[in-house]
Amino acid sequence: MSQNTTGCPPEIINNGTINKDRRDFLKTAALVGGSAVVTGVPLVAYFTAPALSKGTGKWVDFGSMEDLEPGRVSMLSYEFLVKDGWLVLPQRGIVWAKTGEGDKLTVFSSVCTHLSCNVIWQEETQVFECPCHAGKFDVNGRPISGPPKRPLIVLEHKIEDGKLLTLLTL
Amino acid sequence: MNNINRKRSEKLLEQLALNGIIAWLRGLEVHRDGLTWNRFSGSLALVLVVLLFLSGAFMTFYYSPAPGAAYDSVDYALFSVPFGEMIRGVHSYAWNILLVLMGLHLSRAFICGAYKAPRQLVWVSGVFVMLVVPAFIITGDLLPWDQKGYWSTHVRTGIISSVPLIGDFLVRLLQGGPLTGIVTLTRFYVLHVIFLPIVLVILIIVHFHFLYQRGISAPLSGDDAVREKVPFLPNLVNRWLVLFLLVTLTLGLIAWIWPAPLGNPADPTDTSYLPKPEWWVLFLNKLVAIFTGSLMVIATVIIPGALVGLIIALPFLDRSPERHPTRRKKMMLVAAIIAAVLMGLSIMGYIEHFGTPHP
């Protein structure tokens, strides 16, 4: 018989009322479990924290509406400061603005709905083309050929004092 | 004289309290029929892992995990540090060769039926070792912060985000936020140099545990009953060391002549950059181009998941004791079809991405 750590009189252990192996196992298991919880909760929270915060929208100024040629698709580039963890960095990118008759304006995200490459407007063929897998979208952002099945994302926009503001989510 | 020396060394070992471990090491035995020239893939893989650990650990001396600085630090290590190109080149070639080699290792174990009882868990643990390697590649590719690494990561996170329900969360978890920036780079770096190596070492130990306990599979022509054993020390250890020397010299020479290329610094606004998939994911890229939209999950989760599941479950699905490939024609045929499909998809992917120039 090894050392009696159960705190019970030896006769109870010896007559089989108490299963010493089981007690020892449960004790160690409880300690392991406790240690795992005590360390695991803060560590997992520490690691996952940035994944839980939702992206915030930002109204980005794309300049005067008069710069847009009516009836055409224009590339608008943006640059604004974004907080990336502990850094504040300029975030650059492009959107596509389509102007129709009158005040009609649609702003498309340049992100291909297949694998997030940047789509490029082709003036000659009048399609948005994705260079990665040759996906094509028509002038209204609807997929017409290649792998993409969902239309280009239309970004929310508003016009204030003749300036085009677009809501970008990051 | 010899006797006195022996006594001295034994005394020293005892003083260092190493005598028990040395006695244990001396007692380890391996099958002699495993030590032939044509059974090298496992030993070679081990050698490559050691080389990857060595070159990787030393590259961290000149690495700064921040966008911009990362590229400059890699560039500096390449061109301003002695052996810089060689060490990075060895690291780069070693993982490419390791991937090929693990394919060979798996194929050999399959063809020779090495996964059969009592070695089922040798196979399963080995498959788990292989599954860690892509995680190393995905996290490692981003570290130089060049165009290729940045945009490949972009495509990969796009693929991960297609996983239903948890995809977006997974991407945010990996990136540490909504964009590929400094938090992402730090995460990838720490995963690459601390967490994944720990996982890999544990899995390799588990693989070796099963391998040692159940023994390496006998040659197909051999008689299972009488198999001679030789001491692990020095027979297998010397073999590993010879391989290590040869591989290090060869890869060092190759890396010296053809250094691993470093592209241009990552530019998130460069819309013209075309990320080209690496050879080992070409089949997956083709699948992603075939199954699109709501079907994409077939290409990104269902097919790869089913394939991995099938490989892991193989020893429990195929329980017949027959090991010889000519008497396992059905198995060979199924495997050949799967291999041919993967190869075909890879070739199609290659043609799509490298064959025809996009407008």
Image: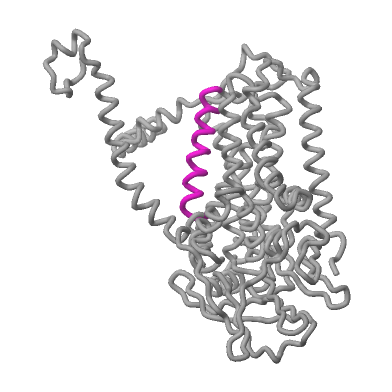
Provide the residue span drawn in magenta: B192-214
Q: In this view, does B338 lie to the left or right of A161?
A: right
Residue B286: x percent and y percent?
A: 77, 51
Residue B58 in sight here = no
Identified at 79% across, 48% down, the residue is: B346
Front position in the image: B29 or B313? B313
**Going by the picture, which residue comes out furthest to the top?**
A15
Quarter holding the N terminus of chain A is: top left
- B303 versus A24 height, above or below: below
Front position in the image: B201 or B131? B131
Identified at 71% across, 46% down, the residue is: B299
**Is residue B272 highlighted in magenta?**
no
Identified at 53% across, 32% down, the residue is: B208
Q: In this view, does B29 lie to the left or right of B133?
A: left
**Is residue B198 highlighted in magenta?**
yes
Quarter holding the C terminus of chain A is: bottom right
- B157 versus A94 height, above or below: above
**Going by the picture, which residue comes out furthest to the front?**
A102
Residue B170 in sight here = yes
Residue B233: x percent and y percent?
A: 51, 32
Q: Main secondary structure of the magenta part?
A: helix
Q: In this view, does B153 lie to the left or right of B345?
A: left
Residue B51: x percent and y percent?
A: 57, 51
Within the image, what quadrant is residue A146 found in? bottom right
Front position in the image: B124 or B255? B124
- A63 versus A9 height, above or below: below
Q: How is the image coloured?
A: one colour
Front position in the image: B154 or A146? A146
Identified at 40% across, 51% down, the residue is: A44
